[in-house]
Amino acid sequence: MKKRTKILTAICAAAVLIAAGAYGGTAYYYSRHFYKNTKINGLDCSGKTAEQVKERLEGQIGSYRLEVVAQDGAGEYLTASQVGLSYADDRAVDRLLKEQDALLWVFKQGKEREHTLKLPSSYSVEKVRAAVDGLSCMQNMTAPQDARMQDNPDGFGCTIVPEIMGSQLDGEAVEKALCEALNTREERVSLEETGCYVRPQVLQDNPELVAAANAVNEEASRILSPQITMQIGSAAETITQDMLKTWVYRDEAGHYQYNRELVNSWVDQVADGYDSYGARRPFTTSLGNTVNVVYKTYGWQMNRDATKELVWEKLNAAASETIEPVYAQTGKNRNGNPDLGDNYVEISIANQRMWYYKDGKLLVDTPIVSGCVANGHSTPSGGVWKINYKASPYVMKGEIMANGEREYETPCDYWLPFNGGIGIHDLASRKAFGGTIYKTNGSHGCINTPYDKVQTIYRNITAGTPVVVW
């Protein structure tokens, strides 16, 4: 009985030893091989040693390629060989094998295991740099352009020209982005998302740019805003916006300014067109014929300097109004040509006749005697003068002669001077008028007039009334 027990004990011990050996052998196997259903970085590593897995991972690196995507969406690939990419063993696979705990293999069989390792690698920076230079997106690049102000076609105001992004890449930034992608084994890198493009510094919504453009447009609008009309009787001369555009220039600081010389020139042109003082104008006589007369002391005359200053002031104040010129001298009627109005005296030397019109009606029609032709005292003609003043009574005095006495001193009841010492007056010693008396027995230049006629004129006329002599 004791012998049988010993035999059974020996058999059991042997079985235990055999089982322990088998278990230990399996544990030993899994200390050097990965469990079944183990995947590393997508590779089936079941029953593979660490070295075998490393060989497969290195092969995986050899097939690696990195897609480089440009801003237009076009992609191109860099391969491992292009950048000199190779596997660098950091013993991560060995650590993973050790961590599977081979002694507990009996409990871990049949389970699926997937591992992702950040596989270390090395690459050639020089090859990466060369690969960058060879990328299609690095060829024929266009530089970015900042948003900017651009003058409008007519030269007034501006618009903002939007920025141009361009396609220029920063080579160093591209190199850095690719190296970072290689380090983490990324399969795709966007050059736009990684900030590799050289971008404009000033965008169209840049506050300073917008403010500057607004300032220019406001100034342009203001410089063209005046609406000034110069009223000249029933006529009007208007400064139009088209005229303003020709008067404006931009100074060195870029500000709009009026050209003072052109503004003054416009005032001169208006004055030349409307001033009658000193001008030659046609005149229709009481006899129906037309003669040309020069406005000697009568007529409208613009004070050009003062009017230029007024226009300049209104322009710079951006005024919109109707103004009148500043006059140095005015006439009786601003409308019509001639601008004598309805009250004037008309004298015909050739016909020795004088007419006086009041309120458009003929009040006096009378013969006269003008300056003596034979004595060289002919009355100046071909002009328009004005009654300077009137006096009653009055003593007409000639020039002082060599003996100290005056050439003459002649009293009259009605005196109406219009051309220096020449005037319209009565003369007690004159009994006949008209005809050819003036040629040999005329006056010293004055207009001798019958008493009742000059009296009527005197009582109705006012200083400033035009006198036409032809």
Image (cartoon, rainbow, N blue to C red):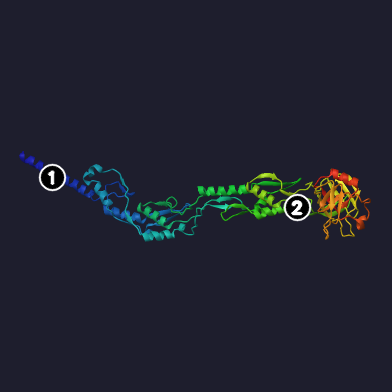
- Judging depth in this view, the residue of 111 and 452 nearest the camera is 452
State the residue at coordinates (83%, 60%): 403
x and y percent of residue 371 in the render? 88, 56
Q: Which mark is residue 14?
A: 1
x and y percent of residue 319 in the render? 65, 45
Spatial distance from mark 2 to mark 1, Cα to Cα? Answer: 141 Å
Which residue was labeled with disc 2? Answer: 273
> Mark 1, residues whose alpha carbon is within 10 Å: few (<14), some, or many (≥20)?
few
> Mark 2, residues whose alpha carbon is within 10 Å: few (<14), some, or many (≥20)?
few
The C terminus: image quadrant: bottom right
SS at badge 1: helix
Q: Residue 343 carries which label?
A: none
State the residue at coordinates (22%, 44%): 104
Q: What amino acid does circle 2 point to? A: Gly
- Judging depth in this view, the residue of 230 and 428 nearest the camera is 428
x and y percent of residue 145 in the render? 51, 54
Left or right of 372 in this view: 141: left
Looking at this view, name the residue that lies furthest to the left. Answer: 2
- Judging depth in this view, the residue of 330 and 127 nearest the camera is 330
The N terminus: image quadrant: top left
